[in-house]
Image: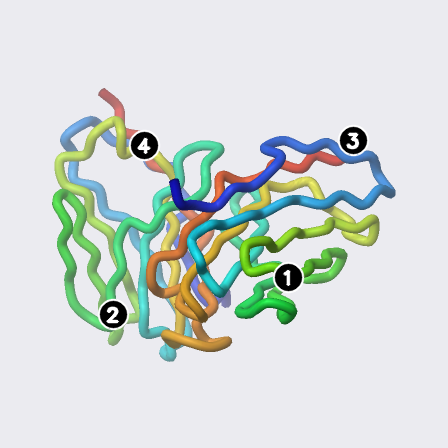
Amino acid sequence: QKEVEQDPGPLSVPEGAIVSLNCTYSNSAFQYFMWYRQYSRKGPELLMYTYSSGNKEDGRFTAQVDKSSKYISLFIRDSQPSDSATYLCAMTRSYTGANSKLTFGKGITLSVRP
Amino acid sequence: DGGITQSPKYLFRKEGQNVTLSCEQNLNHDAMYWYRQDPGQGLRLIYYSQIVNDFQKGDIAEGYSVSREKKESFPLTVTSAQKNPTAFYLCASSIWGGLNTEAFFGQGTRLTVV
């Protein structure tokens, strides 16, 4: 079993839809959870960052972590064509040192249709 | 503008040749990283460096080499020993050991073996 599993996609939704992107993980030592957005042929950029369980909201984006279920989600409200990108979840065990290395999911490609 | 610059954007290599990918950052970050991205594979860590003149192997270091002679620069050499080098290579940097905080990625180098 891979440490981080992400729904493979691709995912296509109409503009204005609510999008739910999910990752599961097997290592209970993961403490810090991130979502990166990557546009085609570009480097990833950090979208959301959360520590431990709970929700974090930033505009149309909400990141949710459920450590008891080893499950994280990213919700996008009122999705826009500009949200079309690949979304990667990532997580790490520690803030510093070797354990701060990121473990990524495979990414899911989202397409928002006008 | 602060950021990470990778060059070249596209690179073609003949089989059996070594090739070096450039990564320069002006963010004054201590830590630098090299990832490889293949379709459907997510990001996999090749090498990382947390301080000048020191670097560590990541998950898929075989067939690659790096150097860190300057804080700003972390070049990656793809050697002829790398069996499947065609991929998208991403360089990243962050504050010391802190990839859980904002990691900045370059725009990537697409390497193709011909």
For this orientation, the residue located farthest to the top is A114
Residue named by callout 4: A84
**Number of other residues with Cα within 10 Å of mark 4, as a class: few under 14, some 14 to 19, many 20 or more:** many
Q: Which residue is drawn at 68% across and 33% down?
A: B11
Task: Name the secondary structure under disc 2.
Answer: strand
Q: Residue under circle 3?
A: B114
Q: How packed is label 3: few (under 14 Cα within 10 Å), some, or many (20 or more)?
A: few
Residues at badges 1 and 4 in contact (C-beta under 8 Å)? no
Indicate the amino acid at tag 1. Answer: Arg
Q: Measured from the top left, where is residue A59 in percent x and y?
A: 12, 45
Going by the numbered disc 2, the residue's amino acid type is: Tyr
What residue is shown with label 2?
A: A51
Which amino acid type is shown beneath numbered disc 4? Ser
Question: What is the C-alpha distance between the residues marked 3 and 2?
Answer: 44 Å
Q: How far is the residue under mark 1 from the one under mark 4?
A: 36 Å
- In the displayed structure, does residue A30 sit left or right of residue B7? left
Depth check, front residue: A15 or A37: A37
CA neighbours of label 2 inside 10 A, class few (<14), some (14 to 19), many (20+): some
Instruction: Indicate the secondary structure of the residue bearing disc 3.
Output: loop
Q: In this view, does B29 lie to the left or right of B62?
A: left
In terms of depth relative to the viewer, which is nearer, A37 or B108?
B108
Say above or below: A71 vs A16. below
